[in-house]
Image: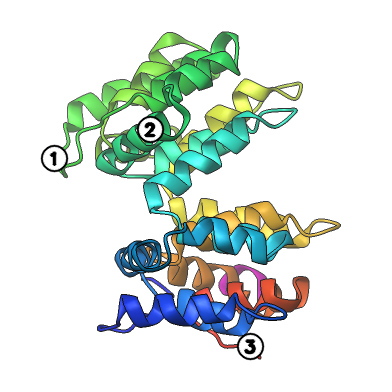
Amino acid sequence: MATLTAPDHHSPIEDAEALRKACQGWGTDEKAIISIMGHRNASQRKLIRQAYEETYHEDLLKRLESELSGDFEKAVYRWILDPADRDAVIANAALRKQIPDYCIIVEISCTRTPEELLAVRRAYQYRYKHSLEEDVACHSTGDIRKILVALVSAFRYDGNEINARLANSEAEILHNALKDKAFDHEEVIRILSTRSKQQLLATFNSYKDTHGTSITKNLVADQPNEFLSTLRTAFRCIKDPTKYFEKVVRNAINRIGTDEDALTRVIVTRAEKDLKKIKELYHERNSVYFDHAVSKDTSGDYKAFLCTLLGKEYK
């Protein structure tokens, strides 16, 4: 359910030439850049980068970095990156914030497939010369470190087979831990970080059937709790990624001052996957079309680029 519209056939060399022309002379032709890169999928973008470098002996990304600016530059830069490399960049930026954004690490760990997460870890190591696990451990402490390292290190079984008896027993383990507010219990971390997503969904369903409430409803504490927030994000990402991402963009738009980082992250990482479903849920929950909300809260070339990825053309 992607929103990206890309041609079945394109010429990487012609695209590279058009991008070169857009970056030459007085002023940059942003519309030309959007019209090309906003309509190319990951494999096509990779071929364009290769053609550009072979033809002009410079990195297209570096050229665009020097030509563009602000939120538009960041969105284009992250869009052009290979998906795994993009996630590596996003994860590194999240960890290096003055207050690390652990929820982004959880988001990447729990919404990517096992093979995608493995590719992210490889890309991270290649780009930063140390592992994602190492940096996560370096920028976290205590129980948060335990769950984050476990999640980013996971390589889950990705099939559909489930064990109903195991789901029932582990639902009770989770219930007892949550009832006692032992959110950091090692069994909670073990279950969440090692079981397949289908097995976890069976466990969550068993929990709700037995106890009459969603497991996330019981993830509450008397005081603000960073570990609990991280844990809740993991449960939500695994249970219903579409609902999770809809809430991220809703919070990004509805706050005082748009959270462009969050808005950009969701659109560029989901445009080739499930952004259409996220758009539909956003409209269902807010009675506003997501495209219109984005258009209202952004401006200029940044708005035009995001709306292009959303499947709309804004002049």
Q: Which residues are magenta?
A: 283-288
- Is residue 181 in view? no
Which of 229 and 136 lies nearest the eye of the viewer? 136
The disc, 2 or 1, on the residue closer to the chain's N-terminal end is 2
Comparing labels 1 and 3, the label whose residue is closer to the camera: 3
In what element is the residue under mark 2? helix
The residue at which mark 3 appears reads as 314
Residue 285 on the magenta span: yes
Which of 113 and 32 lies nearest the eye of the viewer? 32
Residue 199 on the magenta span: no
In what element is the residue under mark 1? loop
Name which residue type carries label 1.
Glu
Name the residue at 62% across, 30% down.
229
The disc, 1 or 3, on the residue closer to the chain's N-terminal end is 1
Give the left or right position of residue 225, taking residue 277 as reference: right
Rendering quarter of residue 225: top right
Query: Spatial distance from mark 1 to mark 3, Cα to Cα?
Result: 45 Å
Query: Spatial distance from mark 2 to mark 1, Cα to Cα?
Result: 34 Å
Which of 76 and 67 lies nearest the eye of the viewer? 67
Name which residue type carries label 3.
Tyr
Comparing labels 2 and 1, the label whose residue is closer to the camera: 2
Q: Position of residue 237 (x, y in %)?
A: 46, 43
Q: Position of residue 15 (x, y in %)?
A: 40, 79
The mark found on residue 28 in the picture is none
Give the left or right position of residue 35, taking residue 222 as reference: left
Q: Position of residue 265 (x, y in %)?
A: 57, 54
The residue at which mark 1 appears reads as 161
Comparing labels 3 and 2, the label whose residue is closer to the camera: 2
Name the residue at 16% across, 31% down.
163
The residue at which mark 2 appears reads as 126
